[in-house]
Image (cartoon, grey):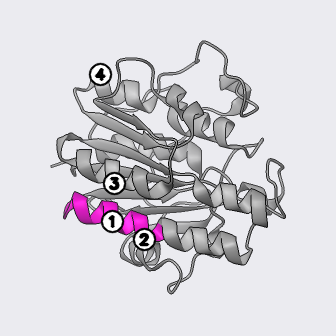
Amino acid sequence: MRPRPALLFVVDGLRPDALDPRRTPTIWRLMNGGAHTLNGRTVVPSATLPAHTSLFYGVGPDRHGVTTNTWSPPVRPTPSLFTVLRAAGLRAGSFYNWEELRDMAPPGQLETSVFLSAPDARVAEEARRHLGGLDFAFVYFGETDLVGHREGWMSRGYLGAVARADGLIARVLDAAGDGAAVVVTSDHGGHGRTHGSDRPEDVTVPLVLHGPGAPERLPEPAGILDVAPTLTALLGVPAPGDWEGRSLLQGP
């Protein structure tokens, strides 16, 4: 029986070394109760739109063509995760507060889509309201990245934003109830007040898998290209052969 719902949380700009049991107890619990790596890899350029496009379309920037946060080509070389789930008859929702992420789902592929030019807490509340009718939900929190650019990655303000995101994940999970499969990751890290390079601080991200079907350990290397194939496996849907990643459910 497939888990319902499957949840993907992306905390923008979340560095693995920002996680600890006191600051992020929810993510820490998911890590200890499932499988995780603190050495996951994103793509280069390590920026939000290229990384999310790779996550949802299963290929790197060299194939999908998105290399900045400001332009996307009109055609994608592979189907989106949302398209694959829709074709299988599953209901998906997207909840986010960075408008450019609208392109992660082609028109007509979502049961529910909520964009809010609002704080992360509003995004979490909308996700909570709509989870009951969904098989899969993407929940994006952007404030960590905003604070990183303003105050610096690993600053006190940044770590406070990380803690708040952890609390919001807990609220959404409370609404999801038992039986949910959960993936938590990020699109990139950061250094100073920026990101986008191939520096370890920019390209290293956490990747957490918890719930039904999760292995005891994740294979290495693992990264955001593996997220979509892992989610389709959790939901019992075949992954497109031209996606570049692989399901992490098989373990190391």
Amino acid type, mark 4: Ala
Amino acid type, mark 3: Glu
Q: Quick check: marks 1 and 2 in contact, CB under 8 Å?
A: yes
Query: In terms of secondary structure, where does tag 3 sit?
Result: helix
Q: Would residue 187 be found to the left or right of residue 28 on screen? A: right
Q: CA distance from mark 1 to mark 4?
A: 30 Å
178 in the magenta segment: yes
- Tell me which residue sits at (57%, 40%) in the image: 98
Res. 87 mark? 4
Residue 92 location in percent, x, y? Answer: 31, 35
Lower sequence index among marks 3 and 1: 3
Q: Residues within 10 Å of mark 1 (few under 14, many from 20)?
A: some
Res. 167 mark? 2
Res. 171 mark? 1
Lower sequence index among marks 3 and 2: 3
Q: CA distance from mark 3 to mark 4?
A: 28 Å
- Tell me which residue sits at (39%, 30%) in the image: 82
- Region in magenta: 166-179
Which one is closest to the eye, mark 3 or mark 4?
3
